[in-house]
Amino acid sequence: MTSRARRFGGVVAAAALATAGIGIPTQAFIGVAGAAGAPRAAVSLISQPAWTELGGTLALGLRFDGDISGLDVRVISHRAITSRIDFEETVGGKRLGGTLATVEVPAGAVPAGPDGPFLELPLTATGAGGSAPGLSINRNGVYPLEIDLVDPDGNSVNGFVTHVVAVPPTAPGASAIGSPLEVAWVWPMAEPPAYRPSGKTDRDVVEELGPLGRVGEIAAALADAEGVPLTLAPGPETVESWAVIEADKPVIGPGLAALRSASLSNQTLRGPYVPLNAQALDAAGLGAQVAPEYAAGADALNGTLDVRVDPRTAVASPVSPATLARMWELNTDRVIIEPDALVGVSNKFTPAAPVMLMSEGHAFTAAVADAQLAELLTGDAPVALRAQWFLSGLAVIANELPNLTRGVVVLPDPSWDPPEALLTTVLAGLRGNPLVRPVDIDTFFDTVPIAEDDTVRELATPQTQPPLAVTQTRYREAESQLTALRNLVGREDPRVRAGKRALLVSLSSAWRGAAGIRRANAELAIIDRSLGDLVHGVAVPERRTLTITAREAEIPVSFQNNTGQPVRVEVTLTSDKLLFPDGSSQILDLPPRNTTARFAVEARASGTFPLTLEVTSPDGRVIFSRSQITVRSAVVSNVGVILTVGAIAFLAIWWLNHARRRRRVRAQTTGAVVGPISTE
């Protein structure tokens, strides 16, 4: 389901919201039920000026739903808000303060404007005899304004609370206070990885990049940001994938074009290729991978948006000593952090200045994001009402200390899902605002002085973070396999690029729980498959028998390369009965298809014996095959010939000597028998 479908999937009039921890008044959404249980009528805000000059007229665009016959519109103005806490209470419909004026007009008598009923209310009551009711607002400030549909008995049927920002008359573009509040608004724009491990695009992610999707609408609103400096925080993987997918899906192109255009005139923050949790990475023994993730992120943004991101400033969330240590290694000394990341320091006024932050001996300038302001933009309240709450909150902070240079940073949640109309309404309210000055985050750091208390802040105890989805052992194994693959096919091979991306994506902090573990390991399996397919594509000889008949010979070995590209391998021969004049190992470049290589050998003996053949990558990381060849040698060595001849000669000499002795013995024996007989 796309963002647009989600937004209109519920009934706004039946919701009770909580914004910034403050209950939004239920009368803004729940009316008096009729017989069938549905509210009889409802009123909502369609438009309101961000500010109104004293002596001027407040123009409210309204919308009525249901049966408004017999109902009046009641408008009650309350005293000016004096503190941020009071403002937050009034957003929730509480502690609205004393009443200044009450105006009632029949709902059916509200004049029609271009987009519906249009109620005009002077800020001050007209003089005696005047016909137009007024709100009795005659000093600059922020005033709660109740707007209700009421029945003839004065009971509220439905209503809401907005705020009037009253300023003294000023020239266009001029400030109404001594030093306008500086507002640095960061726009995160990132989605989960756009490609699945299968190589196919994630349909849900692609939809979010389109004109009706979450990121697509945010990007489209950038076209209305002229004159309002912003700080862009696009996800590098999202932007890189966006540019690739656009070629096949032109419908998502306008959003990317708007982002590219806006990045030329607005500060673009660098970030890791995918969202990271440095604390979890360090705990897993993979903290050193933070730097490659940021390097890949910068390359993706620079290459796709044609900008140079500044390494000095970054969002550190979640933040921990490990996170800041990695930031320091990356030459980052300005960070944007969440408010609960610091040890609390009491302050009478809204913290509206950078602070000095020390962590493990390193000094950072930190901007603490104002979470309550960001929350005012969320929820299901009408666009105009959310925008006015936000702009009124800025006005309250500006009026706290109107002559001091102060500033706030607004950092929405990375998953924020604002409709385009909300963004354009707020942008219009910031442009030329006499109380605030939009700036990028670098300007905020450069122009807003460090908090006056000079307190060096420290990190609060970091919260325990979910463990990383991949183990160090599994990651290192995949990393080693990718190195082997790169050495075999070159770093520009598409499989190597896909493997590098898989390593980066596998470390994302988005992968949590059992499903996250499966997804992270599926990413690393991309490398396994690429290397496995390459190994299986190189066929080596099966076990066979070779016969050599000479002492020096060449053994032919055939290889089959079915990978469709040249592959460099190392072939190692091992045998106790063979010598290898050219060495036992040789590097071979195997072209596609069949190759026969010859290896010089020298037989040391005759007979039958094994020859081991091992085929590996040149770096030894990949083993393609180990096999044995049976060698049958019919060769007699020189030593053997000499020994044989010597043995034969020895036997011949022995036999001749033996024959001579036998003849002498025989002759002596014969003479004794037939010789002369003695006469004695």
Image (spheres, rainbow, N blue to C red):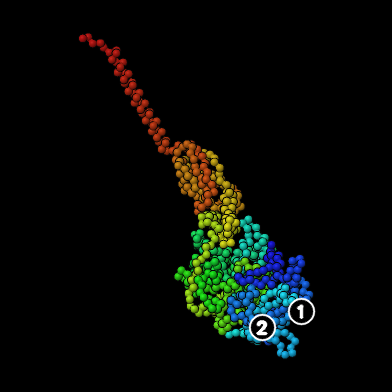
At x 76% / y 68%, what residue is drawn? 34
User: In the drawing, does residue 179 fall left or right of residue 381?
Assistant: left
Q: Quadrant of residue 266?
A: bottom right
Task: Give the amino acid at mark 2.
Answer: Leu
The residue closer to the viewer here, 115 or 533, is: 115
Give residue 82's mark: none
Give residue 100's mark: 2
Measured along the vertical axis of the image, is residue 106 above or below residue 281?
below
- Label located before the other in sequence (2 or 1): 2
The residue closer to the viewer here, 481 or 200, is: 200
Within 10 angstroms of label 2, few (less than 14), some, or many (20 or more) residues? some
Task: Give the amino acid at mark 1.
Answer: Pro
Q: Quadrant of residue 200?
A: bottom right
Label 2 element class: strand
* Residue found farthest to the bottom: 128
At x 54% / y 47%, what residue is drawn? 625
Label 1 element class: strand
Note whether residue 380 is visible: yes
Q: Position of residue 140 (x, y in %)?
A: 63, 84
Note whether residue 428 is visible: no
The residue closer to the viewer here, 232 or 137, is: 137
Q: Position of residue 302 (x, y in %)?
A: 59, 69
Q: Check whether the beta carbons of the residues at disc 2 and disc 1 lie within 8 A of each other.
A: no
At x 58% / y 73%, what residue is drawn? 370
Q: Which residue is mark 1?
A: 106
* Residue found farthest to the front: 153
Q: Quadrant of the C terminus?
A: top left
Q: Position of residue 419 (x, y in %)?
A: 68, 70
Q: Quadrant of residue 98?
A: bottom right
At x 52% / y 79%, what residue is drawn? 449
Q: Quadrant of the N terminus?
A: bottom right
Within 10 angstroms of label 1, few (less than 14), some, or many (20 or more) residues? some
